[in-house]
Image: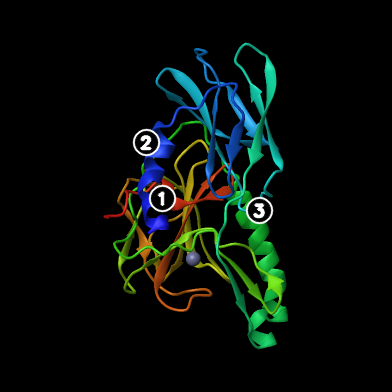
Amino acid sequence: MLRRSFLLLAPALLFAQPVLADTPVVGAPGRIARLRLGKSEQPPKAQIDGRRLLVRKERGEWVALAGIPLSAKAASRLFVDVDHPDGTRERRRITVVDRKYSIQYLTVAPDQADLPADQVAQYDQEREHLLKVLRTFSEAGPASLALRQPVEGRRSSSFGSRRVINGMPRSPHGGLDIAAVEGTPVAAASAGRVIDAAEYVFLGRTVVLDHGQGLLTLYSHLSEIAAKPGDAVAAGATIGKVGATGRATGPHLHFSVYLNAAAVDPALFLPALPP
Ligand code: ZN
């Protein structure tokens, strides 16, 4: 019940909540911190560790939206460097606050826990390639932050959940899974440009879209890809079909949203679930 009511509140928090400029900014892993950057004519630039943040004008004021990585530790600080158009630079802080995500402990046969030796090098290469893709930043911003759900179907609430397999913690689940029948067309969640379309060991056939200012969406386990890098796609355009490629227990869409290369909860951008 609690989780459901939070999802209903989330879009209102993202799009409407004002934050005072000099109040401390906090952000939880997998969520979005907002920093007010003033009313200059030209937009300021903001970055965390060299990764540019999405900056947009809201009610006459520039606001940076910082994705907080799921790996960020509670009580740690993230530093945001802001370059104002008048040449001044300032450093802001975001204090990371705790957020509980579920943890699942599993014991499986050792040969199921790890990749076969011949796939390890491939996986490492893929990981590096994907990290580069996820750091894509283009200046033109998205027309809207609202996204459409790429396929109809029940959404899992597993964003951020962690698995500990044979005592080894795995990376947290950076997306939400939507149950759908194999072959169901997958729609672009918003207008954008295809920046990656490839097959990966874990993610299977995958498409990544750039919506501007570091807002990216990723679609995985596709049975078919219907887009190629460089393509411009309209919101709702078919970019592939639901499948179970890669490491998937059955057909579903794994859907991720990134801001400044950090996976953030897609539910923040999607229409609220019916009560
Ligand atoms: Zn998933």
- Which amino acid, mark 1? Phe
| Residue 173 seen in the current view | yes
The residues tagged by marks 2 and 3 sit, at their Cα atoms, a distance apart of: 27 Å
Which numbered disc, 1 or 3, marks the residue closer to the eye?
1
* In this view, 58 is above or below 187: above
What secondary structure is marked by label 1?
helix
Which part of the image, by quadrant, shows the N terminus? bottom left
Task: Specify few, some or many for label 1: CA neighbours under 10 Å numbering under 14, 14-19, or 20 or more.
Answer: few
What secondary structure is marked by label 2?
loop
Task: Specify few, some or many for label 3: CA neighbours under 10 Å numbering under 14, 14-19, or 20 or more.
Answer: few
Which residue does the numbered mark 2 point to in the structure image?
A: 144
Instruction: Decide which of tag 1 and tag 3 comes sooner along the chain.
Output: 1
Asked whether mark 3 lies closer than 8 Å to ligand 1, one says: no
* In this view, 44 is above or below 197: above
In the picture, the disc for residue 71 is 3
- Which amino acid, mark 3? Ser
In the picture, the disc for residue 6 is 1
What secondary structure is marked by label 3?
loop
- The x, y position of residue 44, in whole percent, is 57, 21
- 32 horizontally vs 87: left or right: left
Viewer-side residue, 201 vs 168? 168
Instruction: Decide which of tag 1 and tag 2 comes sooner along the chain.
Output: 1
The residues tagged by marks 1 and 2 sit, at their Cα atoms, a distance apart of: 22 Å
Instruction: Decide which of tag 2 and tag 3 comes sooner along the chain.
Output: 3
Please name the residue shown 63% across and 53% down the image.
131
In which image quadrant can residue 4 be found?
Answer: bottom left
- Which amino acid, mark 2? Ser
- The x, y position of residue 273, in whole percent, is 31, 54
- The x, y position of residue 16, in whole percent, is 39, 32
- The x, y position of residue 266, in whole percent, is 44, 51
